[in-house]
Each structure stands twice: as C-alpha cells, then as structure tokens.
Amino acid sequence: MFREGGEGECKGEITISKADLENNLKLAGVGKRLQLLENDVIHHTIKNQKKLEEASEKICADTVEAIIAAIFIDSKYSMKKTKKCIRKIFAEEFGELQKVT
C-alpha cells in the first residue's frame, strides 16, 4: 500500500487502512457464508457475472454491515440485543478464534 501511492501516510495510518481491509474481508466472508448473493437476498443491478464476482466482496461486506446497523436501529438502539445478534451471525468465526487461542 505504501508503495502504491501511499506517500505521506504514517505507520499508524497504514495500520488503520490494513485493519479496515481485514475487517471488510471478514465481513465479506460472513456474507458469502450466509450466501447473501446466491439466495437473492441482496438486490443489485449488476448484470455481468464477471463484474458481479469482482464486486461480490464489497457487496457482501456492505450488506453484513447494513444488517448489523438495521438490527441496532430496529432494536431501538439496544447494544445488548445487537451484540446478541452479532454473536449469532459471527458464531462460526468466533468459534474459529477460540480454536486458535
């Protein structure tokens, strides 16, 4: 990233950018596991299959993030209820983390 036009970025900014990328990849992985694109859960206007495949990670990541935001709003801003749903949505990923640690 630093070599690809990231001149002027300090180490902390690069670390934050890397963390954002990793978080989006995790969200995309959850969206793919939930088969959001395969089950027509996400309404999109991309007709070209190749372009859809290229955009699938961003679409899935954005959708999972939007689902969590909707849960938070629909629960009348209850962090407790939102965390409970997040635990269910990410149960598989949390299980993998527990195996590693």
Image (cartoon, grey):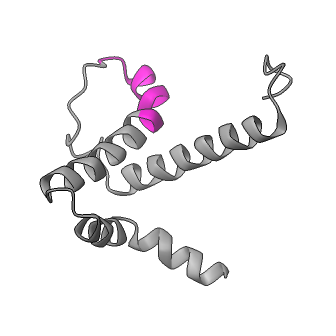
Task: Tell me which secondary structure the magenta stretch mostly adopts.
Answer: helix
Residue at the location (38% across, 24% down)? 49
Q: Position of residue 74 (x, y in %)?
A: 13, 53
Q: Nearer the viewer, residue 42 or 62?
A: 62
- Say which of 10 and 35 sits in front: 10
Q: How many marks?
A: 0
- Residue 69: image x %, image y %? 28, 48
Q: Nearer the viewer, residue 92 or 54?
A: 92
Where is the C terminus found, in terms of image quarters? bottom right
Above-or-below relation of 78 to 41: below
**Residue at 39%, 26% in the rendered image:** 52
**Compared to 12, does 50 lie above or below?**
above
Segment tinted magenta in the rendering: 47-58
Please say if 51 is above or below 65. above
Name which residue lies at 18% across and 50% down: 73
In the rendered image, which quarter contains the N terminus?
top right
- Quarter occupied by residue 6: top right
Residue 64 shown in magenta: no
The percent coordinates of residue 84 (x first, y second) are 28, 73
The residue at 38%/34% (across/down) is 59
